[in-house]
Amino acid sequence: MTYERINFETDSERAVGDEKLQHALVNVTNRFRSARNKASSEVPGWDELRTLAREIKKETIENLDRYLIMLEENVKKAGGHVHWAKDGEEACRIIIEIARKNGVNSVVKSKSMATEEVELNSNLERAGIRAVETDLGEYIIQLAGEHPSHIIAPAVHKTKDDISRLFSEKLGVPYMSDPADLTKVARERMRSEFLSAGMGVSGANFAVAETGTIVIVENEGNARLTTTVPRIHAALMGIEKIIPRYNDLSLFLTLLARSATGQKSSTYVSFITGPRRESDADGPEEFHLVLLDNGRSGILANGETRESLYCIRCGACLNNCPVYRKVGGHSYGWVYSGPIGAIINPQLLGIDKAPELPFASSLCGACRDVCPVKIDFPKVLLELRHEVKETKAETGKGRELFFERLAFRLWRTIVTHERLYGFFSSLMYYVQMPYRGESGGLGSLPYPFSRWTRDRDFPAIAEIPFRERWKELRKEIGEGSTK
Amino acid sequence: MNPYGLELTVLRPAMRVYLFVTCLVDTFFPGVGEGMVRVLDRLGVDVEFPAAQTCCGQPAFNSGYREDAQAVAERFISIFGNALQERRDEETYIVCPSGSCTTMLKVFYKELLSNSPIQLNKLALIANKTYEFSEFLVNVMKRADVGASYKGVVTYHDSCHLLRELGVKDEPRRLIEAVRGIEFREMEMHDACCGFGGTFSVKFPRVSVSMLDEKIDCIIGSGADTVISSDMGCLMNIGGALSRRKIPVRVMHLAELLAHTGSEGD
């Protein structure tokens, strides 16, 4: 699979100008944010729990090979099959082969970022297998032919009116404005899909190495139907979703639900260990677990950015990010959006595909404050910026990058020579003169500063810089220690 | 007694502060440096300005140009290292009117210089002595009331690095609230980024301004006539928009506010 270069600048500018989207973003992020803040404040020692979760994740990721083999053994012991997919193409091929071998021509899916990542739906379609999303948000997105714009609320950018029109257009139902009616339509459609599908495809929120159990967290109940009704269940998960022990789950489930939606617990949590046993009332005859690498081992190899793999996909960083709150998910150009997208998209796709994303942050650190596993986002962003500029410099926009590098080299020369610095700042004082406006500030500067002065005044350089003023001040306050 | 009727305790005369003035303050906002000098002098501190300083290197570091940033950082460390060498006692500090530049020195230099143990050693000596201005006044000098007065309604914008990297939240508020004649009103989303983020504001101006719009709304909503912050980066961003839109709200660095005495304030 090849991806085009992500163009954050163009896409984000479009998003900022889209009033409907702005309105939707404010609503949803505010709602999630206050729910998360309330829910986290109710848990005593919340911060210690985050530290503990981070430590467990660190230990897990640093011993990922060992835990993955343990997981494989235990899934097999429970009667399941395990497949290793080095990239998206291989993951799709594995799932298509499972379907073909069993004569499956229709698949139900529950929400999964990993299947979005590998573009499973379009690959299934190409192989002649129908795939229907059963999470309501994902279903809407699928009907619209779009991509999710939020990790836990994929259709957040769509208004009720958008959805009403979409349903009447694509499903041939009359226009209805009540969300309950719309949900009912979707539910009725899906019921027959569940019953006729030969295979259910899900993701996994966690996989427990010591028991071979995959855990799925959801609110709509569609995931448990997806994983139990069809004859075959295939789960696709990124290799980093693993946790070592069953006992760790109480911690991670607490952190996930409260960070994501502010719920104490999600409505449904499914624990799946292998296929149906004789004594089970329901469940699939076959269970397949597909372990997806797709660039993750590359992140693992980089000690400076490895903690990107601690993410449990709660979406809290999105809701708290002032940039995401303005630009929405689609600006990040791929399935993962917000701060987590800014750090993992360039790493999973290759930094040349997303060289702008590490810069799509004001480094304010609000994401780190809410991350349930305390990923140090600013540190990883800065590391990736360094990678873009110094190790893979040619991947950016050629000319602009050349001038930027030149500008920083010049800046370095100036600020490492005091006299040159003094000379340059007084030179700039005279250079700015023609740009001074009535307020004293600079109203309209040439490129690239025009990018600042389009909507803001720029301050004027002072006639007497502090270093000059200091000489007078010093006389006034007395000569340092001699007074 | 001074004219305002308050006793100013003169601290041990040995206390000395080396100013880490930041390039932004030096070049664009020298009044902030002056404010800092006046406040510290009023509190009886010896103030020195190591004149060879220029910039700490943050612009290059944040933009990914670590080689350039490292050259600047090493020079910076040597200037302040030498200054401290002159007076190797406990009562000597480096004080900076910027949460962001203080963070560069105390937090990011460790990252930047991780390949150079010699530099890290030199850094350790100065980093422990370095404080952001409000943090220094409240936590080191144990002063919230610095004898300032200002007539006006003010609100405070938390700069991201000061708040989240250095954990300084209450100190500036305590200083503001102790100013005579002042009325302090907290704004909504006082801890949300204003959209400056250094080169971020130039790389993605539309996004930056969209974030700034929200901040401006919160400032206006507070009813304040003056917005105070501890970083000139944020204030040139906020102030630039206020001035462009002709909104009559002043921006003022905390050091300038605290330098105010007497009945002025408009």
Image (cartoon, coloured by chain):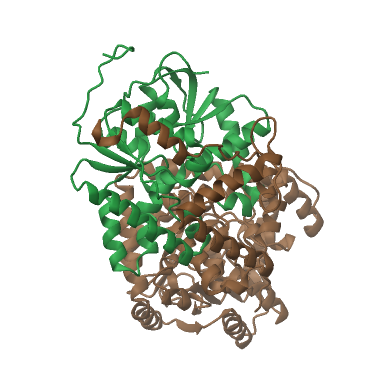
Chain colours: A brown, B green
Above or below A120: residue B66: above
Please give left or right for residue B243 compared with residue A221 in the image: right
Q: Is residue A321 visible?
A: no
Q: How many numbered discs?
A: 0
- Which residue is pictured at 57% across the width and 36% down the height? B238
Furthest residue in direction bottom, as rendered = A101
Identify the image quadrant of residue A201: bottom right
Identify the image quadrant of residue A252: bottom left
- Quadrant of the image for the N terminus of chain A? bottom right
Q: Position of residue A381 (x, y in %)?
A: 49, 61
**Viewer-proximal residue among B116 and A98:** B116
- Quadrant of the image for the C terminus of chain A? top left
**Viewer-proximal residue among A278 and A205:** A205
Identify the image quadrant of residue B116: bottom left
- Which residue is pictured at 29% across the width and 35% down the height? A480
Please give left or right for residue A446 compared with residue A168 in the image: left
Above or below B84: residue B230: above
- Which residue is pictured at 23% across the width and 36% down the height? B15
Above or below A341: residue A91: below
Q: Position of residue A468 (x, y in %)?
A: 46, 39
**Viewer-proximal residue among A351 and B90:** B90
Q: Position of residue B34 (x, y in %)?
A: 42, 32
Q: Position of residue B1 (x, y in %)?
A: 26, 13
Please give left or right for residue A311 compared with residue B237 in the image: left
Q: Is residue B23 visible?
A: yes
- Which residue is pictured at 71% across the width and 44% down the height? A20
